[in-house]
Image (spheres, helix red, strand yellow):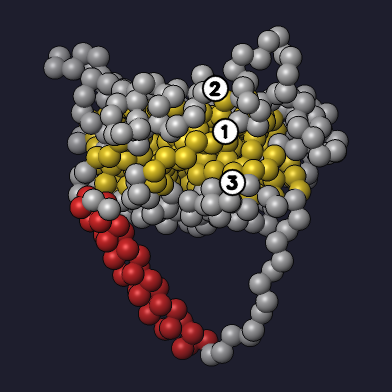
Amino acid sequence: MNARTSKRTSKRTSKRAVTGAVSGLCLTAVLGTMGALPAYAEPEPEPPATERISTTYDGAQLDEPSYGPAMGDGRNTAFTAEGPVGRDDTDGLADVYIHDRLGKNSEVSYNGDGPSRAGTPCTSGRMVGFVSESTKIVTPPRPDRRPLVYIRNRSVGKVTGLHSYQGVAFASMSQPMVDSFCMWITYTATLPPTEADPDPQPRVYRFRFNGGTTDLVSEASGEAAGHPSISEGGRYVAYEQGGDVYVRDLDTGSLEKAGTALGGGAANGTSSAPSISADGRRVAFESRASDLVPGDRNRDVNVFVRDLDTGTTTLVEGAHKKDGTAQASLALNGTHVAYVSARTKRAKGKGPAPSVYLLELATGKTQLISVDSEGGRNDLAAGEPSVNHDGTVVAFASASADLVPGDTNGVSDVFLRTAR
């Protein structure tokens, strides 16, 4: 283990130890006031099952598409729906909802007069970030419909808008992601053009709730940055920039490249779309490079998982020899990765449709997530996977009518699959 890896590991271990000590003290105090708790048995794992969650308040299917799932803890899932889900949703605009542990769908982007999308919850679902073009989400109303990032504190109903950096208003914002502790949010944003920078590129930022501080995460270069993914506690942010995937340590300022070729050199293809674990140790991403691991011969985009502590990279292979893999979603505990397996050169609809799978990294066990009611692959494309904290549930979107009974709306829906 080199000095850099040893330093990185010791810092992460020290942080976990401090957090555990504080949590233990808090728990002791709480138990002291409550007395003894009754003994209970751990619940049995749920059997594999698929549930459509993007439905109306009374359980009926939607007439308009729903998509963009993002999971928190357990079954908490944010998604976007273009049709009304709630009883009072009559504006005909796309809105962000969250499906909670009790199976209830609640609107997050209410009181808006413009479309909203890209919902992202913390694990508990208390804080939800989203993008909106509304002028009325916050008070006073905004003067235009630039897409900007907002945070809804669902416990009190308060909305906070993130509209500027160092006093300069953003021209546009996108791709928010809230950390699992409900303390930080990362996002992509573009500043307006200036004489010094007439063609500004998107950059990645991090914002702390309550404290109100905003940090620039990506390199201040002429290359566009985006697709951020944030660790638990907000210390590490993975993002793409200039055809590579990087992980920034915001405590030390250090920057580490994830898509590294065998031997440590530059890769022979671009990498993008990272998804980071809670402790910042592992990052999943997709790449067109063929020299990240030995034996990558399918000449297609593939998902990889990089262990930044050990410097090892794992290839996530497709369901068939010629399939590529993409759209990686790494479980917070780093044990599982959900992804899409698809054949890029699928000719005129022939061959299997893109499907969602889940890989257990330690064992290599792979299971089909977008499974139809008869145990086979979905008929129409499935994608946008998002896995929960421990890999037991995966959310995805699909217009395939064979995943649950009674799906006759002919549009994309959001589903939850309980894994085996």
Indicate the secondary structure of the residue bearing disc 3: loop
Name the residue that disc number 2 marks. 298
Q: Please tell me which residue is depicted at 21% across the width and 28% down the height of the picture.
A: 220
Residues at marks 1 and 2 touching, judged by CB atoms closer than 8 Å: yes
Q: Please tell me which residue is depicted at 38% across the width and 71% down the height of the picture.
A: 20
Name the residue that disc number 1 marks. 317
Q: Please tell me which residue is depicted at 48% across the width and 87% down the height of the picture.
A: 33
Q: Amino acid at mark 3?
A: Gly
Residue 407 lies left or right of residue 357; in this view the side is right
With respect to residue 99, does 342 lie above or below?
above
Residue 257 lies left or right of residue 392; in this view the side is left
C-alpha span from label 3 to label 2: 19 Å
Tag count in the figure? 3
Question: Could you say where residue 128 lies in the image, as x and y percent from the top left?
Answer: 48, 46
Q: Amino acid at mark 2?
A: Asn
| Label 1: few (<14), some (14–19) or many (≥20) C-alpha neighbours in 10 Å | many
C-alpha span from label 1 to label 2: 9 Å
C-alpha span from label 1 to label 3: 10 Å
Q: Which disc number belongs to residue 364? A: 3
Question: Could you say where residue 314 lies in the image, as x and y percent from the top left?
Answer: 47, 40
Q: Nearer the viewer, residue 46 or 285?
A: 285
Indicate the secondary structure of the residue bearing disc 2: loop
Spot the residue most to the top: 348
Residue 66 lies left or right of residue 242; in this view the side is right
Q: Give the mark, 1 or 2, whose residue is nearer the N terminus.
A: 2
Q: Amino acid at mark 1?
A: Glu
Spot the residue most to the front: 295
Q: Is residue 22 visible?
A: yes
Question: Could you say where residue 76 lies in the image, as x and y percent from the top left?
Answer: 59, 51
Q: Give the mark, 1 or 3, whose residue is nearer the N terminus.
A: 1
Q: Nearer the viewer, residue 66 or 261?
A: 261
